[in-house]
Image: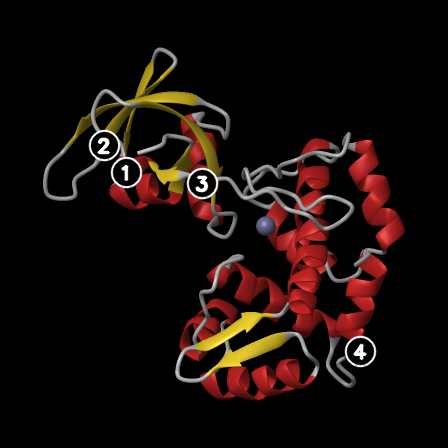
Amino acid sequence: MSHAAARSSAGKAESLPTAAVEDYAKAIYSLTGWGEETASTNDLAEKLGVKAGSVSAMIKKLDAAGLVERVPYHGVRLTAEGTQVAMAVLRRHRLLELFLAEVLDVPWDRVHDEAEVLEHWLSDDLTDLISKKLDDPGFDPHGDPIPDRDLEIVETETAALADLAPGDSARFVRVSDSNPEMLAYLSECGIAVGDQLQLIERQPFDGPITVKIGSESHVLGLTLAQAMRVDHKA
Ligand SMILES: [Zn+2]
């Protein structure tokens, strides 16, 4: 399905505001991925910052529009059509983030909030122009894969930095874009996606870990080490 088709199927959900449909599709995708998993009403409510009752009402509308499938007692997952809506908005979001960071020099901890708004208003033509300007990039500034023009995405498996054993080496490949403080802190430490690192030491009882990047050692708290994804295969 083309972007335009994905856009119109979001719009087809009559009287449903497109931005809300896209936010739900994106949230369900981030909670379930491509698998058979389902997203519960409570998880969605937490993710979207709305009440469970609002989620239930919206799910009914998305179901009627053919964008989600309800699994009794478990939750929802996206239909093929719903997945296309999620892919189209993720493509716009992630390209916008990269454009803001690379072309406008917006710090990487600020691009997400801007993209959250702009992602709903970018035309397909402008989206493709941004992609072309950036040489059809595969990843956004946080290491998240960008769906291509055909809305295909390549999700690679990653491990949490916190799960490495002392002595393990890996490349820092991805971090959630939704915690600006964490991103700003990483910048302050001079740590960036793409850095090669080695786990030196792990303090017991969920204590901090020490990693070496280049010639520098950094002591990182466990929450941060769990959010940082590396390409190490366990
Ligand atoms: Zn983002």
State the residue position of label 1: 162
Q: Are marks 3 and 4 in contact (CB under 8 Å)?
A: no
Q: Name the front one of labels 4 and 1.
A: 4
Residue 73 left/right relative to 206: right
Looking at the rendered structure, the secondary structure element under dot 2 is: strand
Q: Name the front one of labels 1 and 2.
A: 1
Mark 3 sits near ligand 1, with its Cβ under 8 Å away: no
Q: Mark 3 or 4 closer to N-term?
A: 4
Looking at the rendered structure, the secondary structure element under dot 1 is: helix
Residue type for callout 2? Ile
Q: Name the front one of labels 2 and 4.
A: 4
Residue at horizontal 66%, vertical 74%? 67
In the rendering, at what x and y percent does residue 156 appear? 50, 39
Considering every residue shown, the one lying at the far top of the view is 215
State the residue position of label 4: 12
- Using the numbered discs, state the Cα–Cα distance from disc 2 to disc 4 in whole angstroms: 50 Å
Dot 1: within a 10 Å radius of its alpha carbon, few (fewer than 14), some, or many (20 or more) residues? many
State the residue position of label 2: 209
Q: Are marks 1 and 2 in contact (CB under 8 Å)?
A: yes
State the residue position of label 3: 157
In the rendering, at what x and y percent does residue 145 appear? 60, 42
